[in-house]
Image (cartoon, grey):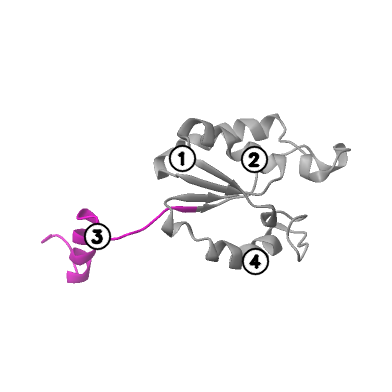
Amino acid sequence: MRQLTHARDAEIVNALSSNEIGTVPFVVLRHTKAIERSLWTGPDAQRPLNDRGYRDALALVAPFAALGLTRVVTSDAVRCIETVWPYVGVAGARLELQPVLSEEGHPAKPHSPEKLARACWPTVRRQSCARTGPCCLN
């Protein structure tokens, strides 16, 4: 600890090394690459991932595992479920579907990722993952 410049730095290092800080990983992401809307003739909520999206979803397994995510909350849109499914399957994380996390399912009908995220924040805050362990919102 003598190598640290400030006494406050030593307090932080001591707290981290003694596991006194109660933090919980909280991940918010958008679905991976889906089939383009213009190429999809069915309901948008049923639009799946494309090949790249499936590869990218598989690539999320290791980072999520490193965070120890135990709960995944996602929109009920197929592409969102497919984005987190590889991790849920490998880790056995609890999967919760929340239609309000989609453009179609949110009462305000926000049509951009930023507007949707802002509109959903009150719901996300109320259902904080801090009580139930690490969480990923999609």
Q: According to the image, label 4 marks what residue?
A: 118
* Badge 2 amino acid: Ile
Tell me where residue 49 appears, x and y as whole percent.
71, 35
Q: Residues within 10 Å of mark 4 (few under 14, many from 20)?
A: few
Alpha carbon separation for disc pair 1 and 2: 17 Å
Q: Residue at x 64, y 61 (%)?
A: 117
Tell me where residue 56 appears, x and y as whole percent.
60, 35
Does 65 lie within the magenta span?
no
Alpha carbon separation for disc pair 4 and 1: 25 Å
Q: Residue at x 65, y 36 (%)?
A: 82
| Residue sitting nearer the eye, 102 or 127 | 127
* Badge 1 amino acid: Pro
Verify CB contact (< 8 Å) between mark 2 and mark 3: no
Which of labels 4 and 2 is toward the front?
2
Q: Secondary structure at mark 2?
A: helix
Q: According to the image, label 1 marks what residue?
A: 63
Q: According to the image, label 3 marks what residue?
A: 20
Q: Secondary structure at mark 1?
A: helix
Q: Residue at x 42, y 51 (%)?
A: 133
* Comes first in the chain, label 3 or label 4: 3
Tell me where residue 44 appears, x and y as whole percent.
81, 45
Query: Is residue 82 depicted above or below 115 in this figure?
Result: above
Q: According to the image, label 2 marks what residue?
A: 81
| Residue sitting nearer the eye, 90 or 28 | 90
